[in-house]
Image: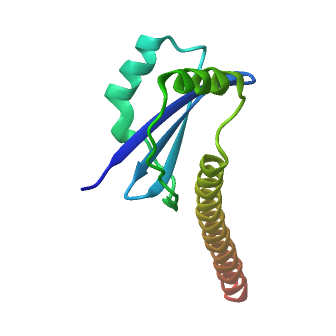
Amino acid sequence: MDKVSGKLTVFFEKPFWIGVFERIEDEKLSVAKITFGAEPKDYEVYDFILKHYFQLSFSPALETVIRKEKRNPKRIQRNIKKQLQEFGIGTKSQQALKLQQEQCKLKRKKKNRMQKEADSERRFELKQQKKRDKHRGR
């Protein structure tokens, strides 16, 4: 039986509010980042999840360890309070976001290189045509 879990962390990173969606599926972690802008209300976050969750671009999946443990409710409350005091996102999430960012960067570089080569080829062809026209006395 497959278990899928998700977690949303909303935090303030100057000058915007950022939301990080963590999804664990088949013992693999994938992350998506969304910028909210102004501080989102609870109902706005809920509405966003309902309407735009399937449009999020999640990072490539990273292997992760899932621990099964029984928790004391008071310990859960302490952990929640501790997480609210923390700033930022988990290291696995940061790794996944970094991996996604690097992949986008590689795609962008490849696209720019192809465009630059095409532009260079076009300019070369124009020069050659100009030479031919000049040679023919036009």
Depth check, front residue: 136 or 69: 69
Q: Residue at x 37, y 35 (%)?
A: 53
Depth check, front residue: 13 or 115: 13
**Place of residue 14 in the rendered image (x, y in percent of width and height, measured from the top left):** 75, 24
**In the image: residue 90, left or right of residue 15:** left
Whether residue 17 is visible? no
**Place of residue 20 in the rendered image (x, y in percent of width and height, measured from the top left):** 55, 36
**Place of residue 64 in the rendered image (x, y in percent of width and height, measured from the top left):** 52, 58
Q: How many marks?
A: 0
Q: Is residue 122 above or below residue 29?
A: below
**Place of residue 112 in the rendered image (x, y in percent of width and height, measured from the top left):** 65, 63
Q: Is residue 42 above or below residue 31?
A: above
Quadrant position of residue 109? bottom right
Depth check, front residue: 34 or 20: 20
Image quadrant holding the C terminus, namely bottom right
Q: Residue at x 61, y 71 (%)?
A: 114
**In the image: residue 109, left or right of residue 67:** right
Q: Residue at x 47, y 34 (%)?
A: 71
Q: Is residue 17 above or below residue 61?
A: above
Image quadrant holding the N terminus, namely bottom left
Whether residue 62 is visible? yes
Depth check, front residue: 25 or 45: 25
